[in-house]
Image: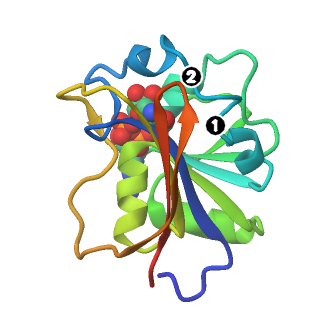
Amino acid sequence: MTEQRTWTGHVFIATSVDGYIARPNGALDWLIDRPGPTGDGGYSEFAATIDHMLMGRGTYEAVAAFDPWPYTRMKVIVLSSTLTAVDDRVTVVRSLPEAIAALTAAGAERVYIDGGRVIQSCLAVGLIDDLVISRVPVLLGEGISLFGALPADVQLESLGVAPIGGGMVQERYAVVR
Ligand SMILES: NC(=O)c1ccc[n+]([C@@H]2O[C@H](COP(=O)([O-])OP(=O)(O)OC[C@H]3O[C@@H](n4cnc5c(N)ncnc54)[C@H](OP(=O)(O)O)[C@@H]3O)[C@@H](O)[C@H]2O)c1
């Protein structure tokens, strides 16, 4: 699946120290209602390199009401087998192979991959090239996990670890092929 890939996949995400990206009900208060990183933690710099985004339905439903819409500089594809009505800011695809085909047909070069289940699906089939994980200094105990089961180990090379303010630590990894 990865041999003909003409684009690279990139994760930029915040987690609790115990690896959750949201509470079980999707709440992000633990991330939002606290001192943030200095500046935006490098998000603007990251986003400026991105031309397409692939997100899951769960993430789409969390961000759909954001005003203003934060993804104006990238084309957004939502992966969902169930969504029926969406706005014209996004394109919906029904499966990961369909997402890959759409990204390739669109001439994607650098794809921002977001949402726990989508990231897990993409990691499992080798569609992610690097990850930036900003850890919030809190243990939630339960929630929506960033990572899950894999068919095989995914070897990572550390590209650095740095404090980014607000008590957060940012880890950067490249996926080793
Ligand atoms: N902390 C952060 O930085 C951060 C970042 C992003 C998101 N979040 C939070 O994370 C939560 C969403 O994460 P999530 O893991 O629940 O959801 P997600 O990955 O955004 O979306 C999951 C949904 O995407 C579709 N999907 C995923 N993989 C698929 C595949 N291989 N093939 C077909 N469809 C697939 C399915 O939709 P259907 O059921 O419709 O088929 C699935 O239910 C939200 O609460 C959001 O706010 C946090």
- Whole-number angstrom distance, CA of label 1 to CA of label 2: 8 Å
Mark 2 falls on what kind of element?
loop
Q: Quadrant of the C terminus?
A: bottom left
| Residue 175 point in image, percent of width and height | 46, 73
The answer to whether any part of residue 58 appears in the image is no
Q: What's the image's color scheme?
A: rainbow
- Of 104 and 13, which appears nearest the observer? 13
- Residue 18 left/right relative to 2: left
Q: Quadrant of residue 105?
A: bottom right
- Mark number for residue 36? 2
In the image, residue 70 lies at what x, y percent?
72, 29
| Residue sitting at x 39%, y 18% | 30
Residue 54 position within the rendered picture, expressed as x and y whole percent measured from the top left: 58, 51
Q: What label sits on residue 41 in the rendered view?
A: 1
Using a 10 Å C-alpha cutoff, classify the residue at mark 2 as few (fewer than 14 neighbours), some (14 to 19) or many (20 or more).
Answer: some
Q: Amino acid at mark 2?
A: Gly
Please tell me which residue is depicted at 73% across the width and 25% down the height of the picture.
69
Q: Position of residue 2 (x, y in %)?
A: 51, 82
